[in-house]
Image (spheres, rainbow, N blue to C red):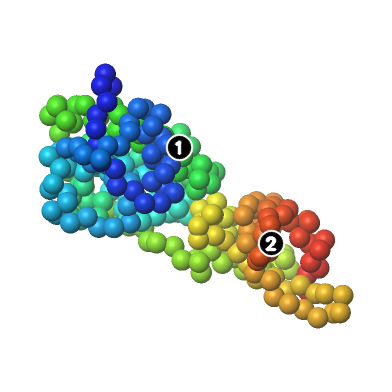
Amino acid sequence: MSEKIKFVFFGSDAVAQSALRAMAKHDLVPSEQADVAVLVSYGKILTKEVIGSFKYGILNIHPSLLPKLRGPSPIKSAILENLEKTGVSIMLLDAQVDHGPILAQEEIALSPQTATEQELREALFEKGAELLANVLPDYLSGKLVPTPQDHAKATYTKKFKSSDGFIPFDLIRGRSAPRRSDLLVAEHKVRALNPEPGTYTMVSTKSQARSTKQIRLKILKAKIESNKFIPLLVQPEGKRPMDWQSFLHGNPIA
């Protein structure tokens, strides 16, 4: 852009911070007062009065190819649903969630089938910031008119809870032949739900006194190998992360 465009920014979490970092690379820096605003992962529903207070409305960088994956968790859901591809949309906010018309969309090269949530988030907002920088001048000058979404094709995501990150220890222990689908779901969870709300299992360990105890064990990284779900990096409750073999060495499985 030949000159800086002022905009107010609405955002409230790590996802919004990722967007701001990406936007800064394209010389997009928020202002305290402007005729247009940008919203990313704000966590609150803005009133019609707030939306209407900006001459050119509020633009949303949404990390999915709308109308797919509307709602609070499009990045995590893209991984959990094992989508081959995803992308980012620049949308004009209206009174309904992720419902407004589209200014621009573009796929990214990184696949949800291999990426972690953080990797996918950074790639999506890198592309989103680039798109925003490209379309803002034409939108503000009236050259670019937003296109309505096809609402009949909309899909929706949910906000994930801690319980969604549970992985049965039987998948790790390997005493039975797990279904391939169960292994894939567990591996997708590790990539999608870390660092928040996280993935975990419950492990029964034995001490030298032959007593057993249950440990809540975070699973930070994992892979599937030889039809087994194998943790790579784990974190016992109240302790630092460690590799799986180090955990087993100090905590014999009951």
Q: Residue at x 26, y 51 (%)?
A: 98
Residue at point 12%, 39% (across, down): 55
Q: CA distance from mark 2 to mark 1?
A: 31 Å
> Which residue occupies 60% across, 64% down?
200
Amino acid residing under circle 2: Lys
Q: Is residue 102 in sight in this rendering? A: no
User: What residue occupies the far front of the structure in this picture?
Assistant: 32
User: Where the N terminus falls, by quadrant?
Assistant: top left
Quadrant where the C terminus is found in the figure: bottom right
Q: 206 and 148: which one is in front?
A: 206
Residue 186: x %, y % from top left: 58, 59
Q: Residue at x 42, y 36 (%)?
A: 21
Quarter of the image holding residue 60? top left
Question: Which residue is disc 1 drawn over?
Answer: 123
Measuring from the top left, give residue 25's x and y in whole percent. 41, 29
In the displayed structure, 180 sits above or below 145; it is: below
Q: Earlier in the sequence, mark 2 or mark 1?
A: 1
Spot occupied by residue 146 in the image (x, y as percentages of width and height): 17, 37
Q: Nearer the viewer, residue 215 or 70?
A: 215
Residue at mark 2:
239
Query: Relative to residue 120, is residue 133 drawn left or right?
Result: left
Name the residue at the top extreme. 2
Image label count: 2
Q: Residues within 10 Å of mark 2 (few under 14, many from 20)?
A: few
Q: Residue furthest right?
A: 208
Pair 2/1: label in front: 2
Secondary structure type for disc 1: helix
SS assignment at label 2: loop
